[in-house]
Image (cartoon, rainbow, N blue to C red):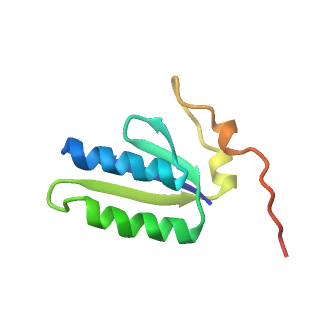
Amino acid sequence: MLTWCIYDISNNKRRKKTICFLEETGLERVQYSVFLGDINLKNKEKLFRNMKQILKKSEDSLYLFSLSETNFKNLEIIGKGFKKEAFLEEKNVMIF
C-alpha cells in the first residue's frame, strides 16, 4: 500500500539516519521532509520500530500513514509537486 512518511527532525544526525533508512525501505523523497512509496505491512512495522529508536520524542515528530490507490489517484497537487504517475505504475499483484 502507498505509504506517506512526513517528518520534522531538528537534529542533523538523526535526520540523516532517518533519510537513509526511509530510502533503504523503498520510500522516495517527494519533498524535503516527505517520502512516499509502496511498502508492505512488514516493512512498515519495521520502519516504525526503527524510527522509534532513532528519533527523540521530545524534539522530533514522524507521521506514517497509508493511502489506498483509489484515494491516491484523486490526490490534487497545486504547484510543482511530483510525478504521481510514477507511484501508480502497474505492479505484479495476484488477487485471490
How far from the left and from the top, in percent, is residue 66? 54, 60
Q: Is residue 42 left or right of residue 92?
A: left
* 79 is higher (above) or lower (below) than 96: above
Which quadrant of the figure has residue 10?
A: top left
Quadrant including the C terminus? bottom right
Q: Is residue 10 left or right of residue 68?
A: left
Query: Residue at coordinates 22% horizontally, 54% vertically from top-left?
Result: 60
Query: Residue at coordinates 83% horizontally, 67% vertically from top-left?
Result: 94
How far from the left and from the top, in percent, is residue 65? 48, 59
Q: Is residue 23 left or right of residue 93?
A: left
Looking at the picture, tell me which residue is in the foreground, 89 or 11. 11
Quadrant including the N terminus? bottom right
How far from the left and from the top, in percent, is residue 70? 69, 54
* 38 is higher (above) or lower (below) than 77: below
How far from the left and from the top, in percent, is residue 91? 77, 53
* 58 is higher (above) or lower (below) than 84: below
Query: Residue at coordinates 64% horizontally, 58% vertically from top-left?
Result: 68
* 29 is higher (above) or lower (below) than 60: above
Query: Residue at coordinates 69% horizontally, 37% vertically from top-left?
Result: 85
